[in-house]
Amino acid sequence: GLNRTRDAALRARAEKVVPSGMWGHLHAAKLPDAYPQFFGRGEGGVLWDVDGNRYVDFMCSWGPNLLGHHHPEVDEAAERQRREGDCLNGPAEVMVELAELVVDMVGHADWTQFQKNGTDATTACVTIARAATGKRKMLVAKGAYHGAVPWCSPSLLGVTAEDRAHLSYFKFNDVESLEEAVKAAGDDLAGILVSAYRHDMGFDQELPSAEFAQAARRLCSDKGAVLILDEVRAGFRLDMAGSWEALGVRPDMSAWSKAIANGYALAAVTGADWLRRAASQVFVTGSFWAGAVSMAAAAATLKIVRRDDVPNRLAYLGRLLREGLETRSRQFGLSIRQSGPAQMPTVLFDDDPDFGKGFAFCNAMLERGVYFHPKHNMFLCAAHTEADIAAALDAAEHSFSVVAALGTGSEGRMGRS
Ligand code: PMP
C-alpha cells in the first residue's frame, strides 16, 4: 500500500477543528479507501499527495486544471498582476481586457460579468432571468447539479420548501417532459437552466440531442423566457465558443467557472443584449469578485485555449484513453461503459450496482499512480502527455485484472459508495 502517514495525521487533526474533517464533494470518505484527503503539489497533469505519492491526475482539480498546473504563461500573467495588486478598491484594467476577450470568444455573448465560484454564476443567471422577465419559475433537469446554495443544493438538509417553491423539473433530453414543465409554469416562466450535457454523478453521461436543444430554445423564445446554459463544468473543454454551438443553438445566458482561469478562482456570466439592462440592475457582488490576479490568469488562459485549440487536443488525448481502456477491459472479459465527451470521460462497470467494481478498479489504479474517479466524470488537461496516457493504460491493465479476479459477487466491494 501507499504511505499515508502525513495524510492520516492531518485527518486526525482536521476531525477536531473541521466538522467531519472535510466538507462536501471533496471529502475523501466518499472515495475508495486508498484515496488521500490532502495534497502536496501539482505540476502539469501530475499531482502529489501530502505523503509524496505521485499520480497522473484525471480529476484535474474537478475541472479547473485545464492547461496543467503551473502553466508558465498563466502563472507569469498572474504573477505580474500580483506585483501590482489583486484586491483593490475595484477592478484593475485587466477586467476590461478579459471581458472583451470573453465577449469575442463566446458565440452568444454581448456582455459578461465576473464572480468567483460556479454557484455565484448560476445564481446570478437565475436572478437576472427573473429580473428581466418579472416571472418566477425556473426549470432544471431532475438530478442536475447547479451549485451548493438553498435554491439548488442536491441536499434538502437546512433547505426550506420555500427555497424551492419556484423550481420545477424536466427530464434531460426529453422534449415531452420539457414541454410539460413549460406548460405547467403557465405565464410565470422565467427560464430554463440546463447543463451543457448530462453529467450527473454515478450515471452514464449523455450529450444533448439537437431536438432537445432546439426545443429548449424554441420554448424560451415563444414564452419570452431565458435559456440559460450551465457551462461551469464543460466550459472551454468542448468548444471555446460555447458547448451548444455545434448544435446551432445559442442560449440567452451562460454560467462559467472552473477552467476559465486554469485554477485561479473566477466565474463568469455571459449574456445576450436583451438581458443587459437586467444584469446592470440586479444586485450581485462579492468582496473578491473584482480580484485582478485571477482575471489576469483568465485572460492568459483564454488566449492559450484559442491559440492552441485546447478542446481538440483534449479530445485527442481522451480518445487515446478511451480506446485503450476499451481494449484492456475486454482482455479481461470485463464490460465497461465509457460515456460523455472524450475530454470528460465517465467510466462505469456493467453489473456494478453498488460501485464495488469501480471502487476496486480505482483503488488499484491509485496504488499504481493514477488518480481516477469511480462515479464522477473525469477531466483531461492539455498538459497530459501521450506517456501519461500510456502509464494510465498500463495501470488499467493491472487494475482490470484485479477486478476480474473479484468474480461477480459482492465480495469485491471496497470502501463506501
Ligand atoms: N454547475 C455545474 C455544472 C458544476 O459542475 C458545478 C461544480 N461542480 C457548479 C455549477 C457549481 O460550481 P462551484 O462548485 O464552483 O460553485
Image: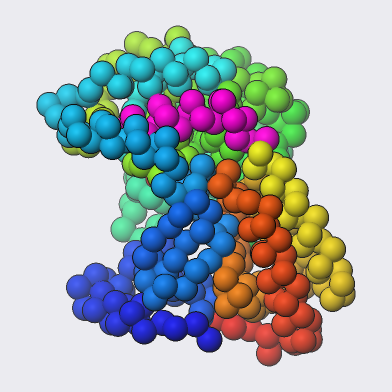
Which residue is drawn at the image coordinates 34% and 54% (left, top)?
A: 159
Magenta region, residue range: 295-312
Which residue is drawn at the image coordinates 17% and 24% (left, top)?
A: 90
Residue 25 placement (x, y as % from top left) = 43, 61
Q: Is residue 38 left or right of residue 405?
A: left
Q: In which quadrant of the rendered view does residue 75 lie?
A: top left
Residue toward you, 382 or 61: 382
Which residue is drawn at the image coordinates 50% and 51% (left, top)?
A: 44
Could you tell me if residue 109 is visible in this image? yes
Q: Is residue 37 above or below residue 66?
A: below
Tell me which secondary structure the magenta stretch mostly adopts. Answer: helix
How many callouts does the rendering have? Answer: 0
Q: In which quadrant of the rendered view does residue 194 lie?
A: top right
Q: Is residue 180 above or below residue 169?
A: above
Could you tell me if residue 118 is visible in this image? no
* Magenta stretch contains residue 124: no
Q: In which quadrant of the rendered view does residue 73 lie?
A: top left
* Magenta stretch contains residue 305: yes
Residue 154 placement (x, y as % from top left) = 45, 54
Residue toward you, 336 or 45: 45
Residue 338 placement (x, y as % from top left) = 74, 56
Q: Quadrant of the C terminus?
A: bottom right
Which residue is drawn at the image coordinates 60% and 35% (left, top)?
A: 310
Residue 166 placement (x, y as % from top left) = 43, 37
Q: Is residue 177 left or right of residue 90?
A: right
Residue lying at the far left of the rendered structure: 89
